[in-house]
Structures are given as C-alpha cells and as structure tokens.
Amino acid sequence: MRDYFNILKIIAVRLLAHLRTWLVACLLLSNLCYAAQLDIPGPTGSGLFGTSVTVLPNGNFVVTDPGFDAPGPIGDVGAVYLYAPNGTLISTLTGSQGNDQVGSAGITVLANGNFVARSVNWNGSRGAATWGSASTGVSGVVSQSNSLVGGSASDQVGGSVVTALSNGNYVVRSSSWDNPAPVTTNSGAITRGIGTGGTSGLISTNNSVLGTAASGGANMVFSYDLTREHLIVGRRNDNLVTIFSDETAPSITPAVGVTRQAGSAVSNSTIATVSDSGQSAGSLVVT
C-alpha cells in the first residue's frame, strides 16, 4: 500500500511540474501577444482624417485629410500631417481656398526618406506637388513658394504619377498642363524635382520640359540618366526628344546635327532638343 501511495505522489509531482510549465508558457505567450492601441483624433476641423496613412523609412508617418475645413469655416481646404512614431504631431500643411483638398492625390515616398504631397484640386485644379522633409515635414499653406504648381485652371499638377528616383530626386508628370505661350491645351509638362529641398514655383522652362502640341501631354514619356543627371523626355506629338539638365549636372554637349542657338537665359537648366531625323529642332539654352 505504501508503494502505491508513493507512486501516486510521484505522478502528482510530475503533473504539477507539467502544469507549472504550461502556465509559464501561457503567461509568456500572453505577453508576446499583448497589443496596445493608441488612437489619434483628427484635429479641429477634420473631415476625412486618415484618408491615407504613409509610413516613412525613419518611422514618422504622413496622414492626409482632404476634407479638413479651415476656420471660417472654409470647406475642404484639406490637410497633410506628419506625425512621430509615438503620435506626436510634427507639422501641418493645409490649403487656403475651398475645395483645395490638399493631399487628395496621395503621398509619394522618396528614396532618401522624404516625401511629396500631391494636391490635384488645389487652386481651381491648378494642382500642386509639395516636398516635405521626413524629419520636420512641411508647414503652412500650399503656395508656389513651397510647391510646384500649375498656372491655369485644370492644369492638375500632382494628379498624374510622381516617380521617385533612386538618387532621392523625383519626376512630376503633368499631363493636363496647358502651355500659356502660345496657349495650347493639355500640352503637358515633365518636371525633375530636387529630393533634398523640393522644386517650387510655376511650371516653366526653368524647371520642366514643356509640350507644345495640343493634347500631347498624355503621350509624353521620360527616362532618367542617373550618371549624368539628365532627364530624357519623349514628346511624340511634337516629334521631339528633349534632354533636360540642371546647373548641378554635367553640361550637355550638342551632337552633330544639333545646333546651339541663342535664347532666353534660363537660370538653372540646360535643354537640348532634337528631332527624330537627327537635325536641329530647337535650341540648347545656356547661361
């Protein structure tokens, strides 16, 4: 009988040991699965806070609210916010007019961690592409002093694709941009943006390759030469290919058949344009 009880005692001890192990495992697993939730309420005036959320490589994240109303109220001026990983607000970018809907077209993350906010409806659908720092964001209201913008209603800058380049720069394609001189509808423009500070101002020859054929913007294509920092743009409706380089990149040496002509000085760009016949079809603008 004593042996029987000893056997039961041994079994009980072993069961308790297994039970202890199981309980410890459950506690460890429950700690691993424990979830914390932090809710960030939309700031005063928010209407569509959280329409898009975009995490940047440094852990900060961008939140858009195209339905944000400015005090007044001014309806749907829109807002783009940058937050720290713990939910602390870093910066706020807004529109200034009704239906600007800043941030409505989304956020493009650049290779260097910065970002571009796209606001296709800004200022009567002139549109804007606004560069923001990954660490400090961008604050204030969208304007041509901090954004690449269109000059005519329905230019819709920021509405087409913004392409992030591997060197941190970016390319903005504006298919609906209207050339003002001579007035040509939807002739299009392609802009090389600077990834370390952004490109701002009206779309012009200072910062972009401009189409000249009506409705040709939809057919403009580009490629980028990272070694020489040249933007190569195909303009099939103009029957041209254009090489664009800014002042920081190696200069363009015209090939045989491409003549260098005097033209309006452009402070930060060099442009060479050739036709598909290899003959001069434009000018190389130099400063």
Image (spheres, rainbow, N blue to C red):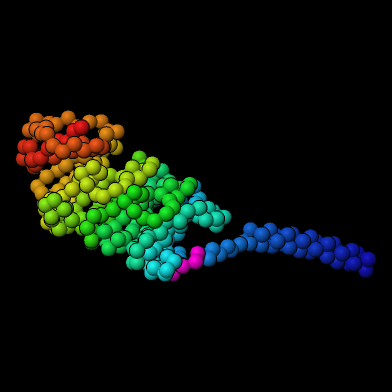
Q: Is residue 261 magenta?
A: no
User: In the visual, does 88 lie left or right of 113?
Assistant: right
Is residue 101 among what the camera can see? no
* Residue occupying the point 47% across, 53% down: 91
| Res. 228 image quadrant | top left
Q: Quadrant of the N terminus?
A: bottom right
Q: Quadrant of the C terminus?
A: top left
Question: 168 or 145: nearer the eye?
Answer: 145
Q: Which residues are magenta?
A: 43-47
User: In the visual, does 250 lie left or right of 90?
Assistant: left
User: In the visual, does 64 lie left or right of 278?
Assistant: right
* Residue occupying the point 34% across, 49% down: 145
Q: Percent x, y for residue 256?
A: 9, 30
* Residue occupying the point 23% across, 61% down: 153
Q: Percent x, y for residue 56?
A: 45, 51
Q: Percent x, y for residue 47?
A: 44, 69
Magenta-drawn stretch, dominant element (helix, strand or loop): loop
User: In the visual, does 136 lie left or right of 160?
Assistant: right
Point out the residue furthest to the right here: 2
Point out the residue furthest to the front here: 72
* Residue occupying the point 40% across, 59% down: 94
